[in-house]
Every structure is written in C-alpha cells, then in structure tokens.
Image (cartoon, coloured by chain):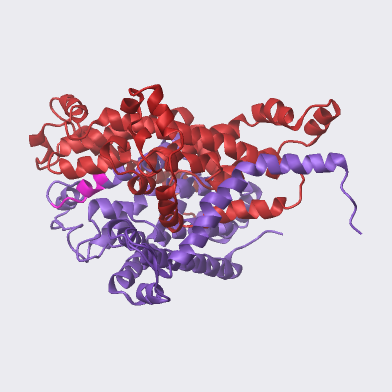
Chain colours: A red, B purple
Amino acid sequence: MTRQPLLSRKLRSALGTGLLQLVMTIAVISFLVPTFWMVSSSLKASTEIFASPIVWIPKQPMWRNYADVFNSPALPMLRFAFNTLFITALAVLGAVISSALVGYSLARIKFPGRDVIFAMVMATTLLPEIVMLIPRFIIFRNLPMFGADDALQISKSLLNVLPWLDRPTWLDTPLPLIVPYWLAGTGLYVFLMRQFFRGIPMELEEAAVMDGASRWQIFWRILMPLAKPATVSVAVFALFQHYNSYLEPVIFLNNKDNWTLAMALRAFNDTYASQWELVFAAATIMVIPMVILFIVAQRYFVEGIATTGFGGR
Amino acid sequence: MLRRPSRAELRQWLDGYLFALPFLIGFIVFFLFPMVYSAWLAFQKWDLIGSPEFVGLKNITRALSDELATKSLYNSAYYTVIAVPLQLILAFLIALALTQNIKFKALYRAGFYMPIIIPVVATAVVWQRVFHPDSGIINNLLAIFGVPAQRWLSDPDMSKPAFIFMSLWSIGRMMVIFIAGLGNIPTSLLEAASIDGAGKLRQTLSITVPLMTPLILYNSIIALINSFQTWVPADIMTEGGPENSTLFVVLNIYRQGFKFFNMGYASALAWELFAIVMGLTLVQFISSRKWVYYEQ
C-alpha cells in the first residue's frame, strides 16, 4: 500500500497557486508604490508631505501645485515642453525614416560590402555613449550654422519660437540632438527594421520587378505598408529614448531658453528642493505623456522587446 | 576570373548604397571621425580655450593611477557585480511566476513593466525622496517593523546598496524577454518530466533554467553594459557623494570633460571605460561556453 500524502495533490496545487497569487499581488503593489506616492504627493498640501505616518491620499487634492509648476517664474515649463516636443518629434521622424531605408537595403538588396555595413551598424550599438559625446561636443562646437542669417531676415519673430537660430555654432541648438538620428544614429533601430524586412517573402519583390517597378516604388508602395508594426515599434522606442534623454541635452544645451523637460526637472529638483509637492508635480507632468504612450502602444513596447531583446531602459 | 557585373547588377548595387547612404554618412561623421578624434585627444592636454598640447601618455597614466578615477571604477564595479545578478534573479523569478497558472497576468506584467517607462530624471527625483531619512517611504515602512531610520543616501556605506536596491525597480525589459523565452519552452518536456515524477522545483532547475541560459546570457550582457555606465541617478540624487561613494565612472568622465574641460584626460578615461566594457563582455561570452546550453 502506498503512503497517503497529507494533502491531496489537487489541494496542494490549489494552495500553491493561491500563495503565488498572494506573493505576486504584494510584489506588484510594491512596484507601483513609488509611482503612486509620486502622484499622490503631487496633490498634497506641504504639511501632509512631511507628516508621519505617511499620508497616502491627500485630504483635499491641491491641483494648485500643478498651476504653480507651470507658473514658476524661474523655470518656464511650457517653453521646455515645447523644446522637448520639437526635438523629440524631429528626432523620432528621422530615426523612423533612416532606419527603414538602411534596414531595407541591408535586408533585401544584395550588394558588395553589405555584411561589413551590417557589422558596422551593430558595432555602433556597443559603443558607450560618453566615448562619442566628448569628440562630438567639439565637432558641434566648430560647426557653423548655415542659413541662420537668412532665417532671421525672413522673420525676426521666428527667434521667439526658435531662439537658437542666431547661434554661431551647433552648440546650444537642437541640431546635435536631431541630425545624427536622421543618419541612422541608433543602430538598434536599423537592426529591428532589417530583421522585419528579412521576414517578408522575396517573391513579392521579384513580381514587382517583373512589372517594372523601381526600387523606390517597391520600398515605398509595397514594403513600407507591410512594415507598419516594425515602424511603430521603432517610433515608440525612439519617442521614449529622445524624450527621456538626459546626457545629450545636458552636454549640448546650455541657455535655459533651449532646455528640455529632463533638464528642467533636474533644475526644478534643485530650485524647489524643499517643496516636494512641486517637485513631484513637475515629475508627474513629465511622466504622464509616457504613461499615455505606454497604455496606447503597450503591445508594440512588449512585442518589440520580446522579438528584438531591447528597448525601454 | 571575376565576372564583369551586368548593368542590372550595377544598378542594384547602386540602389543598395543609396538606401544605406544615411548610415554611411552618419557612420563617418558621427562615429568614425569622432572615434579617431577622441583617440587623438587622449594624447593631448586641452581645456577648449588655448590650443591642444601633446602630452604623450600622461592622460593615460593619470587615468590608471588617479585616485578619483580608481574610486569611480571601484564604485561602478561594486554596483555592477551586485546589481546585475540580483536584477537577473528577480526578473527571472517574476517572469516564472507570471507564466504559471495565476490570474491577472497581463495586469501584473504591466505593473512590473511600468517603472521603466518613467524617465530616468523623474525616477531619480522620486527615489531621492523614497530614501529620505524622515519622510521617505522606505524608512517609514521599516519603522513598522521596528528598524531604526537609515541614512540611505548620506551614509557612504549605505549609498551604493541604496542605488542597487533602486535598480531592482527597473527590471521590466529583462522580465519581458524572460517571459517571451519561457513561452517557447515546449510543454511536452515539462509534462514528460512530470510523468517521471519530477516536482515543480525539479522541473524548473533541470529543464527550464538550462533552456533559458541563452537569454540569461543575453540579459546579463546588456545589464552589465548598462550598469557600468549608470550615472544620471547618482548625479541627481547624491552628486557623487557622500565621500565620492557614488562617483560612478561616467559621472567622473562627465565632470572631467564638461565641468573641468579636461578634454584630453576625459577622452582617455572614456577609452578606458570602453576597453573595460568590451573586456567584460568578452569574458561573459567566453565563460558562456561553459554554462550556456544551446539546442542542436
């Protein structure tokens, strides 16, 4: 006769599942606590911030904190938001277009040196950012701004919107944060596009060639519409990367008029160090667009990471 | 003898180079030239004001002997060696749990993933206060269990552990990769083991973990490269202190280059970092032959 276990197998497994469920619930809550605390503290009165024990939900939400952040005389948040939007939008557009073009050539056109170029793409991804930023800083410092005078003659009011136009160099302008990404500056996006294009059957192209389509037509009319999921993944990752970027803006931008939100939040943290509710409100303002992006495009985030192994931070 | 390419072939090659042109220009202007320039800079003394002055190996010997540089290497190594394995273990355990038969998996996955969509400056600003000795979450939580308040960020012995703990918050990317890998493990293998009487733990250790080793290697390489270059949180939360205990490598390079404008010395330090990161990656690859399981 076999020994009867104390609990039946079924019951034991049900108990195990229940325990696991409990542990994971506690774990996920603890992962969410800092974010929740940030948001709730951004709505607290200053007395509640330093109360002990911690006040988790403010008695009366102080929406005024957000108004105070936007009205800060020292740190014009709307200006920083505009700068960030300008840089991010142009950098993302460049990343999407250039990585699609290069990824297409590496995946679907046979030409001498293609494998070497692909190896070069992958090599750029391994370089630590700081190694390139020191020489790039000096390069951008010595690059003159072409056409700035012309732009000023067109409209002086343009200077109010783009105050960097009268700079004599590329430093303290958004260009160092944009131009490299129009030239496939993030190798991983090229890799992502290449991997996607490789998965599409070659017959598609052969048929189009038979019909006399040009290379550009094949790329633009046939392959790009098919590559929408990969393009969206690159766009989502690039949006996150450029919005989040800190080292590059800190190095290339100096004048407060040109700052991005990431730089501004750091300055906010120093300027209003003891007014936690304002710092938290500023942080929440910076986080909200990313949360929206995540909710809308979660699928692309997760699938992009799962298939390529990178993305996010 | 090499065959002369036909007109159509030449046309195709030209198309290839044209489509790759953005990268070719970008590579030369923003990677190749800067690298060569940086290598040249490493032998110069230059504060951006005068003209560069050749100093031979001075920058390199200074990078290898300077007290702050050594300290920053020690800090980054300490941080990396402890943080990376902990991140891997935690991400793996969470991924494993989220592939079991529990409820709300998608919701939990989103919850664990969420911290990495928070911009790094916002993360630093919030965690600076999470660690606050009086009003921070952690000390308040510890107080419930009767643990006395710790000075996380102002005690040189606690600062690095604090940063390591904080890094465990950002394991979402690793977790997603592990979950994807776990989904590819053939259930037939686990069922066969189960029929042979292997318990859950036994199945995990003997089947799941070996099959996941390629992804563990991948995640550990990426995590190591990232961890060795961590510096933004330290710049914001502690400014490298107390007593330089969070002066990480890139923070030191950043200061030498962009605060003190020692362009030559900063370049030498950057090359040293590059060499170390490459070396460590190579070591991981070579050692992986011993522990990574590849299916034929």
The x, y position of residue A115, in whole percent, is 70, 53
Quarter of the view holding residue A249: top left
Q: Nearer the viewer, residue B223 or B135?
A: B223
A119 to A275, vertically: above or below: below
Q: Nearer the viewer, residue A241 or A111?
A: A111
The x, y position of residue B142, in whole percent, is 18, 52
> What residue do we see at 31% from left, 60% from top?
B261
B261 to A147, vertically: above or below: below
Q: Nearer the viewer, residue A190 or A44?
A: A190
Residue B200 showing in the rendered view: yes
Residue most toward the left?
A47
The dominant secondary structure in magenta is helix
The x, y position of residue B146, in whole percent, is 14, 55
Q: Nearer the viewer, residue B43 or B267?
A: B43
Magenta span:
B125-133
The image shows a total of numbered marks equal to 0
Query: In the rendered view, does A62 fall on the left or right side of A289?
Result: left
B162 to B61, vertically: above or below: above
The x, y position of residue A280, in whole percent, is 22, 37
Query: In the rendered view, does A147 fall on the left or right side of A283?
Result: right
Decide whether residue B176 is among the magenta residues: no
Residue A1 showing in the rendered view: no
Query: In the rendered view, does A27 fall on the left or right side of A222?
Result: left
Query: In the rendered view, does A277 fall on the left or right side of B220?
Result: left
Q: Quadrant of the N terminus of chain A?
A: bottom right
> What residue do we see at 34% from left, 26% from top?
A161
